[in-house]
Image (cartoon, rainbow, N blue to C red):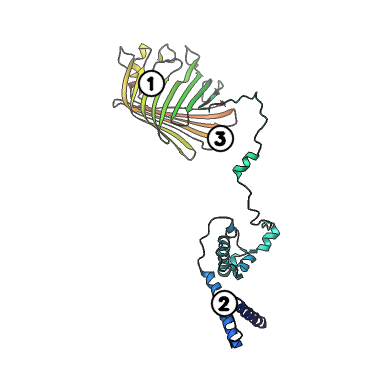
Amino acid sequence: MKIFCAFLILGLLHTAVSAQTRNDSLVTEILPDMEVPDSMQIVHAYMQQIDSLAAVRDSLNAVGVQPTFDAYYYRLVLPSTLYMGVLRDLMSTTTAHTQDEKLLRLRTISRTMARLYTQNPWLVAQTDEDLRNAGELRNDITSNTLTHDGRLSEKVNEVDLSSDVDENVVVVTRRPKFWKVAANTSLKFTQNYYSDNWFQGGVNTYSGLNTFNISANFNNQRKIIWDNNLSAQLGFQTAKNDTRRAFRPTSNSVRLVTKFGYQAWKKIYYSTQVQMSSQIVPNYNSGTDVCNTDFLSPLDMTVSVGMNFNFNIKKFTASLVVAPMAYTLRYVDRDALVTNYGIRPGHNSYHRWGPNVTFNGSWPIAKNVSWSTRIYWFSNLSYTSIDWENTFNFKVNRLISATLYVYPKFDDSAIRYKNKNGKYIMLKEWLSLGLDYSF
């Protein structure tokens, strides 16, 4: 209490002396011929001090100048810290009525920090002394440090930009690679052996399967894409029951698909697609020379014009081609096989028109397990063809993998495609393990 009274008396005396010397005080001058009691001087000085304290109090709650985003406001973005300079700025009378822009910014920051200290003191966990000890604050940066002499454009001429360049150096400009080529081949073998006295009986067989895929895709990163894919499957199996041949083909197909697209909007393209498929080697009935299929017997070709949609759903990538109008040609080179594939006698081909949909997708299910699928649909109101190919690849290591191939198919274009139940549903499936190489 004594310290407070002493502080109040010293403040009043200091104010009284200031009132005698300052022209803007309430008691500006005491003339010798004026009879002013000492008590009146103390009252005037006390009221002036009260007004000054009230102004400081009001400034803490007033809305200051709107700050701009610059380095002056670093205290507002750092962790809450008790800065001793904030208290000094608020208690200073030199910056109370200043018009200097920098000082106004500093005083605004001090008011904000003071509001934090008084309203949420529990948020302040450190002082500026802690920051100095940690080396986070620097005292060697002043206003003079931030000044510069001259413009950068004026200093450019002072820099020596010359360099020793070998005149024999030839600058080569390379075009970006628009083509992306990839290929994959696999070779799988299967062997079955049964002893002569095996209780269930059995036939010893050897089988092999070779698959080959190559793709060459063009993308100029602007408007044009051109995808090309050639795939082939050729497999054989020993046939002891066939008196005419030692091996019979099990997988026997080749397919070429080329698709040209022009970008319409983002991942949507105007598309033209051509697909051709046939067999590679002839296939005969067991024990006879009657041929069922051969190269170009049949040859199926589809030309479709429509829209191509490319999309990604997480790791699943897909392409959908929808063609409202497609042209299909089926050609049979062997005259004896014409009627087997829905072609009239005396002709080697037929033509069909109708809508066509082609869907291709791939999904890496796990690290070494992937799934690729292809759905093909065509109809011309007289017959319908639906293909659904599924390939599951299980990679053991870089060169060894297992493949599960499941191929359901629906085709009612020929009577011979009916199964024993009178349905036009067919199924092909094989599981193999062997060498697999991509390049």
Front label number (3 vs 2): 2
Nearest to the observer: residue 30 or residue 43 = 30
Label 1: few (<14), some (14–19) or many (≥20) C-alpha neighbours in 10 Å: some
- Residue 128 shows in the view: yes
Point out the tag, 3 or 2, that comes first from the N-terminus. 2
Residue identified by numbered label 3: 368
Numbered circles on residues, count:
3
> In the rendering, at what x and y percent does residue 341 appear?
35, 18
Q: Amino acid at mark 2?
A: Ser
Amino acid type indicated by mark 3:
Asn
Q: Secondary structure at mark 3?
A: loop
The quarter of the rendered structure image containing the C terminus is: top right
Residue 370 or 430: which is nearer the viewer?
370
Is 131 rendered above or below residue 406? below
Residue corresponding to mark 2: 25
- Look at mark 1 in the image and give the residue it sits on: 301
Q: Residues within 10 Å of mark 3 (few under 14, many from 20)?
A: few
Q: Could you say where residue 377 lies in the image, as x and y percent from the top left?
A: 37, 29
Tell us which disc is closer to us: 3 or 1. 1
